[in-house]
């Protein structure tokens, strides 16, 4: 099923998944699932570095502020058509599994996190949702 966030972007979710949407945050989950994907939306008004550097800084600030322990360095994927994507996997201070993504096409940025008590195969479904993000051009 395809979902649109106004004139911002669109994405695909599996059947029976639920979207709870507000102006600033979207939650996506399966009722019988293990965790939830949370999306936050940002616009870049001024940038002194490249887009890739900017989203790296955003991710590092989030990781530091939330005391997330990464399993390995963040990965920058610039092979995605029409967007830059940075992602990483780790654990929260209470030992929950977390995967985060920063997906951007200037000036739009979507910050996504998936958290669950432990890592399960559901993260593969969430990866597909995030990979389907397509920004809507102005």
Image: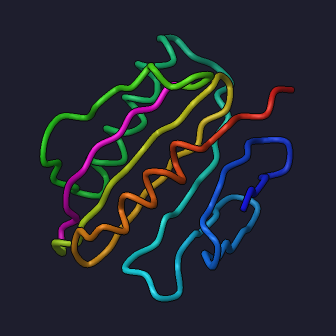
Q: Main secondary structure of the magenta part?
A: strand
In front of the other: 4 or 38: 4
Going 79% across and 52% down the picture, which residue do you hit?
4
| Left or right side of 88 for 84 | right
- 6, 93: nearer the viewer: 6
**Where does the image place residue 34, in percent across and percent down from the top left?**
37, 80
Residue ID at (22%, 65%): 92
Q: Which residue appears at 18% of the width and 34% of the height?
A: 73
How far across and how far down the image is residue 71, in percent?
Answer: 13, 48
In the picture, measured across the screen, residue 120 lies left or right of residue 86, that is: left
Specify the quadrant of the image occupied by residue 86. top left
Quarter of the image containing the C terminus? top right
The structure's colour scheme is rainbow
Q: Is residue 15 magenta?
A: no
Highlighted range, magenta = 84-93
Q: Is 60 placed above or below 21 here?
A: above
Which residue occupies the foreground of this view, 67 or 117? Answer: 117
Residue 23 horizontal side relative to residue 127, left or right: right
């Amino acid at each position: 099923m395809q979902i649109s966030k106004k004139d911002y972007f669109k994405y695909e979710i599996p059947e029976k998944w639920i979207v709870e949407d507000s102006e600033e945050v979207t939650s996506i989950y399966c009722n019988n699932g293990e965790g939830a994907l949370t999306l936050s939306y940002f616009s870049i008004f001024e940038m002194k570095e490249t887009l890739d550097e900017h989203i790296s800084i955003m991710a590092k600030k989030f990781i530091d502020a939330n005391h997330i322990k990464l399993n390995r360095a963040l990965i920058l994927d610039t092979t995605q058509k029409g967007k830059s994507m940075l992602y990483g996997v780790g654990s929260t201070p209470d030992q929950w599994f977390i995967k985060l993504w920063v997906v951007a096409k200037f000036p739009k940025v979507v910050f996504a996190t998936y958290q669950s008590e432990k890592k399960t195969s559901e993260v593969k479904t969430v990866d597909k949702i995030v990979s389907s993000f397509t920004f809507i051009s102005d």
